[in-house]
Amino acid sequence: MLSVLRTIWMVLLHTFRKRDTVQYPEEQPYLPPRYRGRIVLTRDPDGMERCVACNLCSVACPVDCISVVKTEDETGRWYPESFRINFSRCIYCGYCEEACPTYAIQLTPDFEMGEFDRQQMVYEKSDLTISGVGKRPGYNFYRVAGMAVGGKDKGEAENETAPVDVKTLLP
Amino acid sequence: MIFGLSESQLIGIALTAFETVAILLAVILTAALLIWVERRLLGVWQDRYGPNRVGPFGILQVVADMIKIFFKEDWIPPFADKAVFVIAPGIIMFTTLMAFAVVPFSPNLGVVDLNIGILFVLAMSSLGVYSVILAGWASDNKYSLLGGMRTAAQMISYEVFMGLSLLGVVLLAGSFDLRVIVESQAGMWNVIPQFPAFVIFFIAGIAEIHRAPFDLPEAEQELTAGYHTEYSGMKFGMFFVGEYLGIVLISCLVTVLFFGGWLGPWLPGIVWFVLKASFFIVFFVLLRAATVRPRYDQLMAFGWKILLPITLLNVAITGAVVMAMQ
């Protein structure tokens, strides 16, 4: 019986407690940079697309919500012809970001993507691509990769040794 | 001369009718407002806000709820006993509102002064049991019926202590008339000589209107929603508002019987009445926020083994003291 009265008193004391509620639309919580929200396609420091349409993100995706179609430009550089993410399926696991060899696909701290029409949740390449470098400033895949693309031959990348000449025995 | 009544008599009748309608509206509006008050207060005690978006402080939430409940589909299950099913929610509204007829709100406000006022209130709250039992029965649903059965046992048990606890008050005032009872408390509020009676009346009142912690008839966790499981739309709304009307009624009765009704210094009578009644309404919400529901056998044992002896003792001692004083 006394414990009931004690309970009532202690609940009454909650009148003077601070409320836990976050008044959401007015009061935005801080989301850390590594928060896994809306997916974007970033560009390298030169302003070129980072994505090389390797399809690893699409393969890694557990819910198969990424669809990539590959194409090449005249110098042999790979591009996505189309890059489509169905956000109504996406579970924001971040596996695509982990799988990406060029840091192109990144998750951002934004989750306010509500739509009335499900079709609106399908984001095309133009919706996904941002103009910045995202979480990886200064990284340019083709400048460090050994692949020969327009203007840069084998052995000309950063920290890359010249290719071995297999037609001679001299060191 | 109309219907053999003089002009002054007609004006008197019109004024009484106006007063009655005004009290009725005020009481129903208070009950509707309680929907919002309860949610906000529960929010305060659970460290959150509650509805605060619609209108200032969320007060228009009441309007939004009303619009929603009026436009909801009013569905009667095909297996239900239709006539009884429809009439049950009306009974609780009717009986609770009728009980307000004898409540004296201020020295010159109140619908009627019956010389059997307390008995009238008890009779009306007893009739209110029919609403819940018939609703449970007519729904033809085992959970509803279980809720109805529990209500029958609970309300009949607690009605005993409710009536008996008031005997002390009646002995002190020498009348069943609620207005006379208030006036008899001019020297000292009944809560001081009749403290056990006050506690028991309050507990029995909670059980009578089946509010938490004695809301076993509608225990969500065991009986889905108890007797009103099958109800929707405004029929459910009637039960809902009926429950809040019950809170207002019990708060008013506690004020009248134990806390001197409108009596108080400086402020006008009606303000004192509203203040005192509001205090108990808030306490009802606090009880809901703080207490846990007892098991059914605990409820019954608590009533018959603890409350009944104390009540009888209180009646006997009060009777002896009153007789010795004469």
Image (cartoon, rainbow, N blue to C red):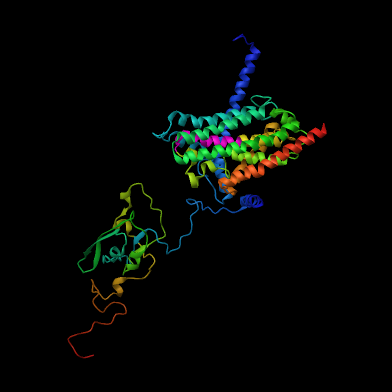
Left or right relative to B244: residue A1: right
| Residue B305 rendering spot, x and y as whole percentages | 65, 44
Left or right relative to A24: residue B257: right
From this view, report whether residue A144 is shown above or below residue B51.
below
Tell me which residue sits at (62%, 36%) in the image.
Answer: B159
| Residue B88 rendering spot, x and y as whole percentages | 50, 31
Which range of residues does the magenta coloring cover? B230-248
Residue that protrudes farthest toward the left in the picture:
A167
Tell me which residue sits at (63%, 30%) in the image.
Answer: B121
From this view, report whether residue A40 is shown above or below residue A164.
above
Question: Can you say which quadrant of the picture contains the N terminus of chain B?
Answer: top right
Task: Give residue A60's quadrant in the image.
Answer: bottom left
Q: Main secondary structure of the magenta part?
A: helix
Task: Give residue B21's quadrant in the image.
Answer: top right
The number of discs equals: 0
Left or right relative to A131: residue B251: right
Tell me which residue sits at (70%, 36%) in the image.
Answer: B258
Q: Is residue B305 visible?
A: yes
- Of the pair B30 and B232, the residue shown nearer to us: B232
- Of the pair B92 and B183, the residue shown nearer to us: B92
Q: Does residue B288 show up magenta in the picture?
A: no
Residue that protrudes farthest toward the bottom in the picture:
A170
Question: Can you say which quadrant of the picture contains the C terminus of chain B?
Answer: top right
Left or right relative to A16: residue A57: left
| Residue B151 rendering spot, x and y as whole percentages | 54, 38
| Residue A124 rendering spot, x and y as whole percentages | 29, 56
Q: Does residue B234 show up magenta in the picture?
A: yes
Q: Is residue B32 visible?
A: no
